[in-house]
Amino acid sequence: MDKKGINFGQLFLGIIIIAFTLVSIVYLSIKIGYFILGLQKEILAAIIAGSSTIIVSVVSITIGKYYERKLIIEEDYVRKKFLCMWNLLGFGLN
């Protein structure tokens, strides 16, 4: 397609799809909220405890992997810097 400009049909369809998706998410969130509020207190406490356990474990693993990857990148940088300085000073292993 070498037409330049906006295809208003595709733009309109995209806006309709995004609007429908947002309305569906809000509707389902409201329905789930009413369902959860209608549950017994013990069941609601168990759902909250279970979901918080899952969320905390996922977040802690994600943070751990982030710092592990950051450490690997920093070690690689230091190693490359050392080799560069080693070769710059003429102590290369030729």
Image: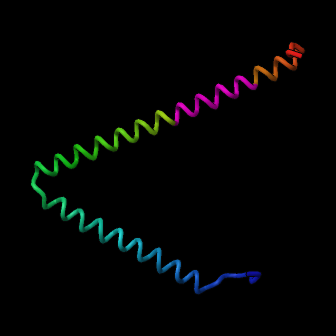
Q: Residue at x 90, y 15 (%)?
A: 90
Seen in the picture, residue 69 relative to 86 is either above or below; the reply is below
In the drawing, does residue 48 fall left or right of residue 55?
A: left
Quadrant for the C terminus, please.
top right
Q: Dividing the picture into quarters, in which one does residue 55 lie?
A: top left
| Percent position of residue 67, x then y | 52, 32
Residue 27, image x and y in percent?
30, 71
Answer with the quarter of the image where residue 85 lies.
Answer: top right
Image coordinates for residue 71, horizontal then vertical, percent? 58, 28
| Main SS category, magenta section | helix
Query: What range is drawn magenta here?
Result: 66-80
Q: Is residue 31 magenta?
A: no
Outermost residue toward the bottom? 9
Q: Residue at x 40, y 36 (%)?
A: 60
49 up-or-down from 44: above or below: above
Residue 80 percent location from the top left of the image: 75, 26
- Residue at point 35%, 73% (across, down): 24
